[in-house]
Image (tube, rainbow, N blue to C red):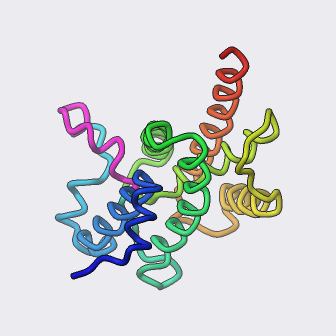
Amino acid sequence: MQINPQLTTFAKRYPILTLFMVLSTVISLLTGFGYFFDVLLWFHFDWTRIANGQWWRLITPIFLHFPMLGIIFAHLAFNLIWFYYFGTRIEQTDGSRYFLGFILLAALVSNSCQAYFSPGLFGGLSGVVFAQLGYLFLRPKLSFYPAPIPDNIAFFLIGFMLLSAVGLFGGGIANAAHLAGFAFGLAWAWVRHLQRQYQ
């Protein structure tokens, strides 16, 4: 089977973005979007199993997605659209190794906060997405950054995050992961800015 050359070019240009989009899709399918519970248990966040050496669980909840608004693919699609939109900017501007580190740290922070404040089954790439949002919202305001995002998009998503956090959209939303991810992105923008200043 011949692979579309445009996909190959994209994967070479954005290898980390491509990897995480593929992993999110494949693992969501393997878990049946939450319906194949025995498979899902290999990836969910569990403090006891993490303490026993299953460290991957600190990260892998970002690959789990569930039905949203009665549509089985909606949660995954929503997250991948924004992950792509923000991720292309970060990986192209800051580099693939930097982007990988950013994703892993954002996942660690957002997953841990969600598990601490709201124990139970959760999943989704949105904690990382809001970390990307926080980074791209603040980073260009501190110093020159060649890939800013429009303020109207940033304010729309920040508004959604805050309204969701106060319960306007009901339950079943990983609000702690969203808020922690966004805070991480803001903090990372400051760190990156200070690094550039003292280079």
Q: How many marks?
A: 0
Expressed as whole percent of the image width and height from the top left, the position of residue 97 reads 44, 38
**Residue located farthest toward the bottom when viewing the structure as drawn:** 70
Quarter where residue 197 is shown: top right
Q: Which residue is at the front of the view, 15 or 24?
A: 15
Expressed as whole percent of the image width and height from the top left, the position of residue 136 reads 69, 47
Quarter where residue 67 is shown: bottom left
Rendered position, 198 above or below 146: above
Q: Which residues are magenta?
A: 48-62
52 magenta-colored:
yes
**Residue located farthest toward the top when viewing the structure as drawn:** 198
> What kind of secondary structure does the magenta stretch mostly adopt?
helix
Q: Which residue is at the front of the view, 31 or 173?
A: 31
Rendered position, 8 above or below 42: below
In the rendered image, which quarter contains the N terminus? Answer: bottom left
Q: Which residue is at the front of the view, 30 or 50?
A: 30
Q: From the viewer's perspective, is 88 left or right of 119?
A: right
Expressed as whole percent of the image width and height from the top left, the position of residue 103 reads 47, 44
Residue depicted at 82% across the width and 57% down the height: 151
Expressed as whole percent of the image width and height from the top left, the position of residue 166 reads 70, 57
Residue depicted at 41% across the width and 60% down the height: 18
